[in-house]
Image: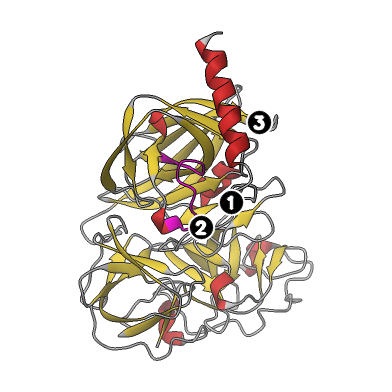
Protein backbone atom coordinates (compact mmCIF):
# COMPACT_ATOMS: atom_id res chain seq x y z
CA UNK A 1 0.00 0.00 0.00
CA UNK A 2 1.47 3.39 -1.01
CA UNK A 3 1.97 6.01 1.66
CA UNK A 4 -0.31 8.43 -0.19
CA UNK A 5 -3.12 5.84 -0.31
CA UNK A 6 -2.63 5.06 3.37
CA UNK A 7 -2.90 8.78 4.32
CA UNK A 8 -6.12 9.08 2.31
CA UNK A 9 -7.69 6.08 4.06
CA UNK A 10 -6.60 7.47 7.42
CA UNK A 11 -8.23 10.83 6.63
CA UNK A 12 -11.51 9.27 5.60
CA UNK A 13 -11.55 7.00 8.64
CA UNK A 14 -10.99 9.91 10.97
CA UNK A 15 -13.74 11.80 9.16
CA UNK A 16 -16.27 9.03 9.79
CA UNK A 17 -15.40 8.92 13.48
CA UNK A 18 -15.84 12.64 13.98
CA UNK A 19 -18.49 13.43 11.38
CA UNK A 20 -21.40 13.28 13.81
CA UNK A 21 -19.93 15.95 16.09
CA UNK A 22 -19.16 18.24 13.19
CA UNK A 23 -22.10 17.59 10.92
CA UNK A 24 -23.59 21.06 11.04
CA UNK A 25 -22.28 23.95 8.89
CA UNK A 26 -19.81 26.30 10.47
CA UNK A 27 -21.60 29.62 10.55
CA UNK A 28 -20.50 31.02 13.88
CA UNK A 29 -17.96 33.83 13.72
CA UNK A 30 -16.45 36.34 16.05
CA UNK A 31 -16.44 39.93 16.85
CA UNK A 32 -16.18 42.70 14.55
CA UNK A 33 -13.68 44.41 15.95
CA UNK A 34 -14.54 41.41 14.47
CA UNK A 35 -16.39 43.43 12.10
CA UNK A 36 -17.66 41.25 9.35
CA UNK A 37 -18.94 41.95 5.93
CA UNK A 38 -21.75 40.80 3.78
CA UNK A 39 -22.26 40.41 0.07
CA UNK A 40 -24.86 38.62 -2.08
CA UNK A 41 -28.20 40.27 -1.17
CA UNK A 42 -26.86 43.32 0.65
CA UNK A 43 -23.26 44.33 1.16
CA UNK A 44 -22.40 45.81 4.52
CA UNK A 45 -18.72 45.51 5.30
CA UNK A 46 -17.71 44.87 8.86
CA UNK A 47 -21.26 44.49 10.06
CA UNK A 48 -22.51 41.03 9.19
CA UNK A 49 -21.45 37.83 7.51
CA UNK A 50 -22.89 36.18 4.43
CA UNK A 51 -23.77 32.50 4.17
CA UNK A 52 -24.00 31.11 0.65
CA UNK A 53 -26.21 28.31 -0.66
CA UNK A 54 -23.35 25.80 -0.45
CA UNK A 55 -22.66 26.57 3.20
CA UNK A 56 -19.71 28.93 2.85
CA UNK A 57 -19.71 31.91 5.18
CA UNK A 58 -17.42 34.84 4.52
CA UNK A 59 -16.73 38.40 5.61
CA UNK A 60 -14.25 40.94 6.95
CA UNK A 61 -13.17 41.60 10.54
CA UNK A 62 -12.12 45.17 11.26
CA UNK A 63 -11.54 46.05 7.61
CA UNK A 64 -8.28 44.08 7.30
CA UNK A 65 -8.88 40.43 8.29
CA UNK A 66 -10.74 38.58 5.54
CA UNK A 67 -12.18 35.14 6.26
CA UNK A 68 -14.16 32.34 4.67
CA UNK A 69 -15.53 29.25 6.44
CA UNK A 70 -16.28 25.86 4.92
CA UNK A 71 -19.11 23.36 5.49
CA UNK A 72 -18.15 20.44 7.70
CA UNK A 73 -16.25 17.66 5.94
CA UNK A 74 -16.00 19.40 2.59
CA UNK A 75 -12.23 19.78 2.46
CA UNK A 76 -9.77 17.55 4.29
CA UNK A 77 -6.30 18.84 5.13
CA UNK A 78 -2.87 17.34 5.68
CA UNK A 79 -0.17 19.24 7.56
CA UNK A 80 3.56 18.78 7.39
CA UNK A 81 6.28 19.10 10.02
CA UNK A 82 5.98 21.02 13.28
CA UNK A 83 4.11 24.30 13.29
CA UNK A 84 2.81 26.99 15.62
CA UNK A 85 -0.74 27.74 16.72
CA UNK A 86 -1.98 31.33 16.37
CA UNK A 87 -5.03 33.20 17.67
CA UNK A 88 -7.73 34.60 15.38
CA UNK A 89 -5.97 38.00 15.33
CA UNK A 90 -2.70 36.39 14.21
CA UNK A 91 -0.94 36.60 17.56
CA UNK A 92 1.38 33.73 18.49
CA UNK A 93 0.09 31.32 21.15
CA UNK A 94 3.61 29.92 21.71
CA UNK A 95 2.09 26.47 21.29
CA UNK A 96 3.53 24.04 18.76
CA UNK A 97 1.81 21.18 16.98
CA UNK A 98 3.13 18.53 14.65
CA UNK A 99 1.81 16.99 11.46
CA UNK A 100 -1.57 15.17 11.42
CA UNK A 101 -4.72 15.67 9.33
CA UNK A 102 -8.19 17.10 9.74
CA UNK A 103 -11.12 19.01 8.21
CA UNK A 104 -10.77 22.59 6.97
CA UNK A 105 -12.98 24.98 8.91
CA UNK A 106 -11.77 28.45 7.96
CA UNK A 107 -9.20 30.39 5.94
CA UNK A 108 -8.30 33.74 7.47
CA UNK A 109 -6.19 36.40 5.67
CA UNK A 110 -4.59 39.04 7.87
CA UNK A 111 -3.81 41.82 5.39
CA UNK A 112 -1.86 43.92 7.88
CA UNK A 113 0.38 40.96 8.69
CA UNK A 114 0.51 39.79 5.04
CA UNK A 115 -0.20 36.28 6.34
CA UNK A 116 -2.98 33.71 5.90
CA UNK A 117 -4.13 31.19 8.50
CA UNK A 118 -6.33 28.09 8.59
CA UNK A 119 -8.54 26.75 11.36
CA UNK A 120 -9.13 23.01 11.45
CA UNK A 121 -12.61 22.08 12.70
CA UNK A 122 -11.56 18.52 13.44
CA UNK A 123 -8.40 19.21 15.42
CA UNK A 124 -9.86 22.24 17.21
CA UNK A 125 -13.62 21.59 17.29
CA UNK A 126 -14.99 24.74 18.89
CA UNK A 127 -17.77 27.11 17.85
CA UNK A 128 -16.20 29.86 19.94
CA UNK A 129 -14.15 31.93 17.49
CA UNK A 130 -12.11 33.61 20.19
CA UNK A 131 -10.95 30.15 21.36
CA UNK A 132 -9.98 28.82 17.94
CA UNK A 133 -6.41 27.96 17.12
CA UNK A 134 -4.97 28.63 13.67
CA UNK A 135 -1.97 27.50 11.65
CA UNK A 136 -0.33 29.38 8.83
CA UNK A 137 -1.72 28.25 5.51
CA UNK A 138 1.83 27.50 4.36
CA UNK A 139 1.88 24.57 6.80
CA UNK A 140 -0.85 22.79 4.80
CA UNK A 141 0.75 20.20 2.53
CA UNK A 142 -2.48 19.05 0.89
CA UNK A 143 -6.18 19.90 0.45
CA UNK A 144 -8.35 16.90 -0.42
CA UNK A 145 -11.87 17.61 -1.62
CA UNK A 146 -14.92 15.55 -0.67
CA UNK A 147 -17.08 17.78 -2.85
CA UNK A 148 -16.44 18.29 -6.56
CA UNK A 149 -17.33 22.00 -6.34
CA UNK A 150 -14.03 22.86 -4.65
CA UNK A 151 -10.76 23.50 -6.45
CA UNK A 152 -7.44 25.00 -5.40
CA UNK A 153 -6.82 28.59 -6.37
CA UNK A 154 -3.61 30.53 -6.10
CA UNK A 155 -4.41 33.98 -4.70
CA UNK A 156 -2.07 36.97 -5.11
CA UNK A 157 -2.51 40.22 -3.18
CA UNK A 158 -0.63 43.36 -4.23
CA UNK A 159 -0.18 46.76 -2.58
CA UNK A 160 0.57 49.59 -5.03
CA UNK A 161 0.48 53.38 -5.31
CA UNK A 162 -1.65 55.28 -7.82
CA UNK A 163 1.12 54.91 -10.43
CA UNK A 164 1.01 51.15 -10.08
CA UNK A 165 4.32 50.91 -8.23
CA UNK A 166 4.63 48.32 -5.46
CA UNK A 167 4.73 49.98 -2.02
CA UNK A 168 4.72 46.91 0.22
CA UNK A 169 5.28 43.17 0.13
CA UNK A 170 2.78 41.20 -1.93
CA UNK A 171 1.48 37.83 -0.78
CA UNK A 172 0.56 34.64 -2.64
CA UNK A 173 -0.91 31.43 -1.28
CA UNK A 174 -3.18 28.55 -2.27
CA UNK A 175 -6.67 28.03 -0.84
CA UNK A 176 -9.78 25.94 -1.67
CA UNK A 177 -12.63 27.82 -3.33
CA UNK A 178 -15.63 27.05 -5.50
CA UNK A 179 -16.46 30.59 -6.61
CA UNK A 180 -15.38 34.19 -6.11
CA UNK A 181 -16.61 34.44 -2.50
CA UNK A 182 -13.20 35.19 -0.99
CA UNK A 183 -12.51 37.77 -3.66
CA UNK A 184 -15.80 39.50 -2.79
CA UNK A 185 -14.74 39.73 0.83
CA UNK A 186 -11.29 41.03 -0.15
CA UNK A 187 -12.95 43.84 -2.12
CA UNK A 188 -14.68 44.91 1.10
CA UNK A 189 -11.41 45.13 3.04
CA UNK A 190 -9.45 48.35 3.58
CA UNK A 191 -5.91 47.39 4.66
CA UNK A 192 -3.34 49.93 5.80
CA UNK A 193 0.15 50.86 4.63
CA UNK A 194 2.22 53.31 6.67
CA UNK A 195 2.50 56.68 4.95
CA UNK A 196 -0.40 56.00 2.58
CA UNK A 197 -4.19 56.32 2.50
CA UNK A 198 -6.31 53.50 1.11
CA UNK A 199 -7.85 54.35 -2.26
CA UNK A 200 -9.38 51.34 -3.99
CA UNK A 201 -9.47 47.57 -4.41
CA UNK A 202 -9.73 45.68 -7.69
CA UNK A 203 -9.78 42.01 -8.64
CA UNK A 204 -8.49 40.42 -11.83
CA UNK A 205 -8.60 36.76 -12.83
CA UNK A 206 -6.01 35.15 -15.07
CA UNK A 207 -6.61 32.55 -17.76
CA UNK A 208 -5.87 29.90 -15.13
CA UNK A 209 -8.81 31.20 -13.05
CA UNK A 210 -6.43 32.30 -10.28
CA UNK A 211 -7.44 35.67 -8.81
CA UNK A 212 -5.26 38.67 -7.98
CA UNK A 213 -6.37 41.47 -5.68
CA UNK A 214 -4.69 44.86 -6.02
CA UNK A 215 -5.03 47.46 -3.26
CA UNK A 216 -4.18 50.98 -4.40
CA UNK A 217 -3.04 53.71 -1.99
CA UNK A 218 -2.45 57.46 -2.17
CA UNK A 219 0.80 58.72 -0.67
CA UNK A 220 0.20 61.03 2.28
CA UNK A 221 1.46 64.61 2.22
CA UNK A 222 2.69 66.55 5.22
CA UNK A 223 -0.70 68.17 5.77
CA UNK A 224 -3.07 65.33 4.89
CA UNK A 225 -3.24 61.59 5.28
CA UNK A 226 -4.66 58.68 7.13
CA UNK A 227 -2.54 59.34 10.18
CA UNK A 228 -4.31 62.55 11.14
CA UNK A 229 -4.48 62.66 14.90
CA UNK A 230 -5.62 66.21 15.53
CA UNK A 231 -6.53 67.41 18.96
CA UNK A 232 -10.13 67.36 17.80
CA UNK A 233 -10.08 63.55 17.66
CA UNK A 234 -8.86 63.50 21.24
CA UNK A 235 -11.46 66.05 22.34
CA UNK A 236 -13.12 65.40 25.65
CA UNK A 237 -16.39 66.90 24.45
CA UNK A 238 -19.12 64.38 23.85
CA UNK A 239 -21.17 64.07 20.68
CA UNK A 240 -24.43 65.97 20.63
CA UNK A 241 -26.24 62.70 20.08
CA UNK A 242 -25.42 59.10 19.29
CA UNK A 243 -28.56 58.79 17.19
CA UNK A 244 -28.11 57.97 13.52
CA UNK A 245 -29.42 61.33 12.33
CA UNK A 246 -27.19 63.48 14.53
CA UNK A 247 -25.67 66.36 12.60
CA UNK A 248 -22.60 66.28 14.83
CA UNK A 249 -21.84 62.89 13.29
CA UNK A 250 -21.83 64.27 9.76
CA UNK A 251 -18.56 64.04 7.86
CA UNK A 252 -16.25 66.98 7.36
CA UNK A 253 -17.63 67.40 3.87
CA UNK A 254 -21.08 68.19 5.28
CA UNK A 255 -19.78 71.42 6.74
CA UNK A 256 -18.87 72.57 3.25
CA UNK A 257 -22.47 72.98 2.22
CA UNK A 258 -25.21 75.38 3.22
CA UNK A 259 -27.95 73.51 1.39
CA UNK A 260 -29.10 69.95 1.88
CA UNK A 261 -31.30 67.59 -0.03
CA UNK A 262 -34.85 67.59 1.25
CA UNK A 263 -36.22 65.28 -1.43
CA UNK A 264 -33.89 62.33 -1.13
CA UNK A 265 -36.49 59.60 -1.28
CA UNK A 266 -38.22 60.77 -4.44
CA UNK A 267 -36.76 61.12 -7.92
CA UNK A 268 -36.31 64.68 -9.07
CA UNK A 269 -38.39 65.75 -12.06
CA UNK A 270 -36.41 68.95 -12.67
CA UNK A 271 -33.93 67.16 -14.91
CA UNK A 272 -36.61 65.64 -17.16
CA UNK A 273 -35.23 65.67 -20.68
CA UNK A 274 -32.12 67.61 -19.65
CA UNK A 275 -28.55 66.41 -19.81
CA UNK A 276 -26.65 65.52 -16.66
CA UNK A 277 -23.98 68.07 -17.52
CA UNK A 278 -26.49 70.87 -17.67
CA UNK A 279 -27.83 70.21 -14.20
CA UNK A 280 -24.71 69.27 -12.30
CA UNK A 281 -21.69 71.12 -11.01
CA UNK A 282 -18.95 71.56 -13.60
CA UNK A 283 -16.31 70.12 -11.31
CA UNK A 284 -16.04 67.37 -8.73
CA UNK A 285 -13.81 67.77 -5.70
CA UNK A 286 -11.91 64.88 -4.14
CA UNK A 287 -12.04 64.61 -0.37
CA UNK A 288 -10.25 62.79 2.39
CA UNK A 289 -12.02 59.46 2.39
CA UNK A 290 -14.46 58.72 5.14
CA UNK A 291 -17.04 56.03 5.85
CA UNK A 292 -20.74 56.81 6.11
CA UNK A 293 -23.81 54.64 6.60
CA UNK A 294 -27.42 55.09 5.64
CA UNK A 295 -29.84 55.67 8.51
CA UNK A 296 -32.95 55.76 6.31
CA UNK A 297 -33.95 54.52 2.86
CA UNK A 298 -31.70 56.09 0.21
CA UNK A 299 -30.89 55.55 -3.44
CA UNK A 300 -27.59 55.13 -5.27
CA UNK A 301 -27.46 57.06 -8.55
CA UNK A 302 -25.24 57.22 -11.63
CA UNK A 303 -25.03 61.02 -11.53
CA UNK A 304 -25.80 63.86 -9.14
CA UNK A 305 -29.29 64.08 -10.65
CA UNK A 306 -31.60 61.83 -8.64
CA UNK A 307 -33.95 60.63 -11.36
CA UNK A 308 -35.54 57.23 -11.87
CA UNK A 309 -33.45 56.63 -14.98
CA UNK A 310 -30.26 57.43 -13.10
CA UNK A 311 -31.04 55.30 -10.07
CA UNK A 312 -28.84 52.21 -9.68
CA UNK A 313 -30.66 50.75 -6.67
CA UNK A 314 -32.47 51.47 -3.43
CA UNK A 315 -31.01 50.76 0.01
CA UNK A 316 -33.83 50.03 2.42
CA UNK A 317 -33.75 51.24 6.01
CA UNK A 318 -31.96 48.66 8.16
CA UNK A 319 -31.48 48.04 11.89
CA UNK A 320 -28.44 49.84 13.26
CA UNK A 321 -26.22 46.75 13.18
CA UNK A 322 -26.96 46.10 9.50
CA UNK A 323 -26.91 49.57 7.98
CA UNK A 324 -25.35 49.81 4.49
CA UNK A 325 -21.97 51.53 4.41
CA UNK A 326 -20.24 53.65 1.79
CA UNK A 327 -16.78 55.12 1.38
CA UNK A 328 -16.98 58.80 0.39
CA UNK A 329 -14.46 59.40 -2.40
CA UNK A 330 -15.59 62.85 -3.53
CA UNK A 331 -18.51 65.22 -3.78
CA UNK A 332 -20.34 67.30 -6.35
CA UNK A 333 -23.28 69.69 -6.48
CA UNK A 334 -26.39 69.86 -8.57
CA UNK A 335 -27.12 72.97 -10.58
CA UNK A 336 -29.22 74.16 -7.65
CA UNK A 337 -26.23 73.75 -5.32
CA UNK A 338 -27.38 70.59 -3.50
CA UNK A 339 -24.45 68.56 -2.23
CA UNK A 340 -24.06 64.92 -3.20
CA UNK A 341 -21.54 62.36 -2.01
CA UNK A 342 -19.65 60.42 -4.61
CA UNK A 343 -19.23 57.01 -2.98
CA UNK A 344 -17.87 53.53 -3.40
CA UNK A 345 -20.02 50.71 -2.09
CA UNK A 346 -18.60 47.74 -0.22
CA UNK A 347 -18.96 45.68 -3.40
CA UNK A 348 -16.80 48.18 -5.32
CA UNK A 349 -19.57 49.99 -7.23
CA UNK A 350 -19.39 53.78 -7.49
CA UNK A 351 -22.22 56.30 -7.64
CA UNK A 352 -23.84 59.22 -5.84
CA UNK A 353 -25.91 59.37 -2.67
CA UNK A 354 -27.45 62.17 -0.66
CA UNK A 355 -25.25 64.12 1.76
CA UNK A 356 -28.23 65.05 3.92
CA UNK A 357 -27.38 64.22 7.54
CA UNK A 358 -30.99 63.16 8.11
CA UNK A 359 -30.23 60.20 5.84
CA UNK A 360 -26.52 59.44 6.23
CA UNK A 361 -24.06 59.67 9.11
CA UNK A 362 -20.45 58.81 9.90
CA UNK A 363 -20.01 55.08 10.43
CA UNK A 364 -17.42 55.69 13.15
CA UNK A 365 -17.52 57.91 16.20
CA UNK A 366 -15.50 61.07 15.59
CA UNK A 367 -15.56 62.44 19.14
CA UNK A 368 -15.23 60.74 22.50
CA UNK A 369 -18.56 59.15 23.53
CA UNK A 370 -17.21 58.66 27.11
CA UNK A 371 -19.09 55.36 27.50
CA UNK A 372 -20.28 52.82 24.97
CA UNK A 373 -22.38 49.68 25.12
CA UNK A 374 -21.42 46.69 23.00
CA UNK A 375 -24.34 46.02 20.63
CA UNK A 376 -22.79 43.51 18.26
CA UNK A 377 -24.50 40.15 18.78
CA UNK A 378 -21.15 38.34 18.89
CA UNK A 379 -19.40 40.93 21.03
CA UNK A 380 -16.17 42.74 20.22
CA UNK A 381 -12.49 42.34 21.02
CA UNK A 382 -10.05 44.73 22.66
CA UNK A 383 -6.51 44.93 21.31
CA UNK A 384 -3.12 46.32 22.28
CA UNK A 385 -2.52 47.93 18.89
CA UNK A 386 -4.48 50.55 16.99
CA UNK A 387 -4.75 48.29 13.93
CA UNK A 388 -6.65 45.87 16.18
CA UNK A 389 -4.04 43.17 16.46
CA UNK A 390 -2.64 41.54 19.60
CA UNK A 391 -5.96 40.68 21.18
CA UNK A 392 -6.25 41.33 24.92
CA UNK A 393 -9.79 40.20 25.72
CA UNK A 394 -13.34 39.73 24.45
CA UNK A 395 -16.38 41.79 25.53
CA UNK A 396 -19.88 40.34 25.25
CA UNK A 397 -22.94 42.13 23.94
CA UNK A 398 -24.34 44.46 26.59
CA UNK A 399 -20.97 45.23 28.20
CA UNK A 400 -20.53 48.92 29.08
CA UNK A 401 -17.01 50.29 28.46
CA UNK A 402 -15.41 53.58 29.49
CA UNK A 403 -13.64 55.50 26.72
CA UNK A 404 -10.82 57.99 27.26
CA UNK A 405 -10.06 59.04 23.65
CA UNK A 406 -10.70 58.54 19.95
CA UNK A 407 -7.87 57.85 17.52
CA UNK A 408 -7.94 58.11 13.73
CA UNK A 409 -6.87 55.03 11.76
CA UNK A 410 -7.20 55.23 7.98
CA UNK A 411 -10.82 56.00 7.13
CA UNK A 412 -11.87 54.60 10.50
CA UNK A 413 -11.43 55.60 14.12
CA UNK A 414 -10.68 53.56 17.23
CA UNK A 415 -11.88 54.02 20.77
CA UNK A 416 -9.16 53.95 23.41
CA UNK A 417 -10.46 52.48 26.64
CA UNK A 418 -9.36 53.70 30.07
CA UNK A 419 -7.11 50.62 30.34
CA UNK A 420 -5.23 51.70 27.21
CA UNK A 421 -6.57 49.04 24.85
CA UNK A 422 -8.24 49.72 21.50
CA UNK A 423 -11.70 48.72 20.32
CA UNK A 424 -13.69 49.47 17.20
CA UNK A 425 -15.51 52.82 17.00
CA UNK A 426 -17.99 51.43 14.49
CA UNK A 427 -21.48 52.54 15.46
CA UNK A 428 -22.98 49.29 14.21
CA UNK A 429 -20.87 47.54 16.87
CA UNK A 430 -20.93 49.92 19.84
CA UNK A 431 -23.46 52.53 20.94
CA UNK A 432 -22.89 55.69 22.94
CA UNK A 433 -24.42 55.29 26.40
Asked if residue 162 can be seen in this view, the reply is: no
Q: Is residue 318 magenta?
A: no
First in sequence, mark 2 or 3: give its number: 2
Q: Is residue 118 magenta?
A: yes
Q: Quadrant of the C terminus?
A: bottom left
Q: Residues within 10 Å of mark 3 (few under 14, many from 20)?
A: few
Question: SS class of the residue under badge 3?
Answer: loop
Question: SS class of the residue under badge 2?
Answer: loop
Q: Position of residue 185 (x, y in %)?
A: 54, 49
* Front residue (pair 14, 422): 14
Asked if residue 313 can be seen in this view, the reply is: yes
Magenta residue span: 117-129
* Mark 1 vs mark 2, CA separation in Å: 8 Å
Res 26 label: 1
Res 127 label: none
The residue positioned 47% from the left and 48% from the top of the image is 66
Q: Is residue 121 left or right of residue 230?
A: right
Q: Is residue 148 above or below residue 115?
A: above
Res 29 label: 2
Residue 159 sits in quarter: top left
The residue positioned 42% from the left and 30% from the top of the image is 172
Between marks 2 and 3 in the image, the one whose residue lies nearer the viewer: 3
First in sequence, mark 3 or 1: give its number: 1
Q: Position of residue 397 (x, y in %)?
A: 45, 76
Residue that lies at the very extreme toward the front in this rendered image: 17
* Front residue (pair 144, 302): 144
Q: Is residue 64 above or below residue 82?
A: below
Residue 140 sits in quarter: top left
Q: Position of residue 152 (x, y in %)?
A: 57, 27
* Mark 2 vs mark 3, CA separation in Å: 23 Å
* Front residue (pair 128, 37): 128
Between marks 1 and 2 in the image, the one whose residue lies nearer the viewer: 1
Amino acid sequence: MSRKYFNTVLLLSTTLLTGLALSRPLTSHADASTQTSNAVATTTASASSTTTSNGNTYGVDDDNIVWITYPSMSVLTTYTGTGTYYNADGSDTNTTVSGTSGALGEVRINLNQRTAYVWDSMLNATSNTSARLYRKVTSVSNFMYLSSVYTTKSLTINFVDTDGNSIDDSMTFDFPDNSDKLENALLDATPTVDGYTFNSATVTTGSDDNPAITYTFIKNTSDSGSGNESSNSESSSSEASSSESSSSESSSVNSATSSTDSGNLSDSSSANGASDTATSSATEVSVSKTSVYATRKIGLYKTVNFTKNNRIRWYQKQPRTKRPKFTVIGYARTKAGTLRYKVKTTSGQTGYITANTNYVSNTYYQMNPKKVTVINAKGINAYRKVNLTSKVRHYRKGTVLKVKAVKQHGITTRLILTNGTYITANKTMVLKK
